[in-house]
Image (cartoon, helix red, strand yellow):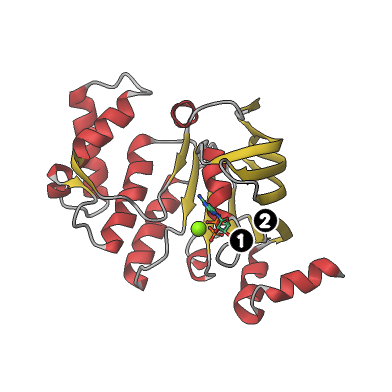
C-alpha cells in the first residue's frame, strides 16, 4: 500500500519567487525505506519540510498524498497527528521546556494514553536506548552533545510511534559508534506498516540502514533512482556521474 506519494511537486519559498523543488515524484509504500542523497543546497531539507507542512515553503503545483489522502492543505500539527514525523537537521535547544514534558505534550495530542502509562513507556524506551533518564529532566537539547541531540530525535520517533518518519541528516556529525547505535534504533522502528525517508550526504549510514530505493536529488529534481548500488556510485564518482547519466 502506498504510504506517501508525491506527485509532480513544485515548491517555492513562501516569501520569495524562487523555485526550489521542480517536479518531484516519489512513492514510498508501507514497509519501505527510501534514501535521498544529494549535494548541499539541492533541496533535500526543503522536501522534508514541505512534506511536514512548514509554512516557509509554498507548494505551487503537485500533490502530497499520505495514507490515500491529499495533505497539501493540512497544518504541521494535523500532519503530525496523522503520523508524520520529521527529525530536525539541527535540533533546536529550548530553554524552559523539559524533555519529559515536551514528549508528553506531544504524545497527548494524538493519543489518550494516561500519564502513568506514558511514563512507563518512556522509561522503557529510554532504557532500551541506553540513555540516562536524567535526560528527561533536562531542558530540551540544552547542552546535549551533537550525538545526544541526534539520539534524542530518534528516541522521539520511537516513543511517539509515528508511521512515516523523515530523518534529515540524522548521521551528520556522528562517530561510527554513535552512528551504529542510531541505525540500530531506526532499524527497530522499521516494520511492514511504517515508511522511512532517510536524507543523507553519505553512503555510510546506508550500510547500516539498508534502503529499498535510493534517489539522487540535484537542483530540485530527482535525476536518478535505483537501489543500494546508486549510493556506492555516488561515493565513488561524486554526484556528477548521476547528472551525466540523466543526460544520456
Ligand atoms: P539541502 O537540504 O539539500 O542542503 P535545502 O533544501 O536546505 O538544501 O535548500 C535548497 C535551496 O533552497 C538552497 O539554495 C537554499 O539556500 C534555498 N533555501 C531553502 N530554504 C530557504 C529559506 N528559508 N530562505 C532562503 N533560501 C532557502
Ligand atoms: Mg539539508
The CB of the residue at mark 2 lies under 8 Å from ligand 1: yes
Q: Could you say where residue 117 lies in the image, as x and y percent from the top left?
A: 22, 26
The residue located at (37%, 68%) in the rendering is 173
Q: Can residue 123 be seen in this view?
A: no
Residue 227 in percent (x, y) is at 68, 62
The quadrant of the picture occupied by the C terminus is bottom right
Q: Which residue lies furthest to the top in this view?
A: 112
Mark 2 Cα within 10 Å, few/some/many (few <14, many 20+)?
A: many
Label 2–label 1 contact, CB within 8 A = yes
Q: Residue 220 carries which label?
A: 2
Q: Which of 137 and 125 is in front in this view?
A: 137
Image x and y of residue 231, in percent: 62, 69
Q: Residue 110 carries which label?
A: none
Q: Ligand 1 near label 1 (Cβ, under 8 Å)? A: yes
Which comes before the other along the chain, label 2 or label 1? 1
User: Is residue 146 among what the camera can see?
Assistant: yes
Q: Which residue lies furthest to the bottom in this view?
A: 236
Residue denoted by label 1: 42
Q: Which residue lies furthest to the right in this view?
A: 248
Amino acid at each position: 500500500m502506498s504510504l506517501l506519494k508525491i506527485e509532480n511537486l513544485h515548491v517555492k519559498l513562501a516569501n520569495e519567487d524562487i523555485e526550489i523543488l521542480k517536479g518531484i515524484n516519489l512513492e514510498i509504500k508501507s514497509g519501505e525505506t527510501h534514501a535521498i542523497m544529494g549535494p548541499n543546497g539541492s533541496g533535500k531539507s526543503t522536501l522534508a519540510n514541505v512534506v511536514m507542512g512548514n509554512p516557509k515553503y509554498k507548494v505551487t503545483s503537485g500533490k502530497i498524498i499520505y495514507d490515500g489522502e491529499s495533505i497539501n492543505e493540512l497544518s504541521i500539527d494535523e500532519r503530525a497527528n496523522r503520523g508524520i514525523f520529521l527529525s530536525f537537521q539541527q535540533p533546536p535547544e529550548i530553554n524552559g521546556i523539559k524533555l519529559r514534558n515536551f514528549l508528553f505534550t506531544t504524545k497527548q495530542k494524538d493519543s489518550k494514553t494516561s500519564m502513568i502509562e506514558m511514563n512507563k513507556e518512556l522509561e522503557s524506551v529510554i532504557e532500551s536506548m541506553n540513555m540516562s533518564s536524567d535526560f528527561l529532566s533536562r531542558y530540551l537539547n540544552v547542552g546535549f552533545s551533537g550525538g545526544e541531540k541526534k539520539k534524542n530525535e530518534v528516541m522521539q520517533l520511537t516513543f511517539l510511534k509515528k508511521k512515516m518518519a523523515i530523518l534529515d541528516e540524522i548521521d551528520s556529525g556522528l562517530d561510527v559508534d554513535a552512528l551504529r547505535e542510531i541505525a540500530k534504533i531506526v532499524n527497530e522502528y522499521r516494520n511492514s506498516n511504517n515508511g522511512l525517508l532517510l536524507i543523507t550526504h553519505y553512503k555510510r549510514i546506508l550500510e547500516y540502514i539498508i534502503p529499498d530505493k535510493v534517489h539522487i536529488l540535484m537542483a530540485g529534481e530527482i535525476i536518478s533512482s535505483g537501489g543500494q548500488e546508486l549510493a556506492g556510485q555516488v561515493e565513488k564518482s561524486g554526484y556528477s556521474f548521476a547528472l551525466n547519466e540523466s543526460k544520456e
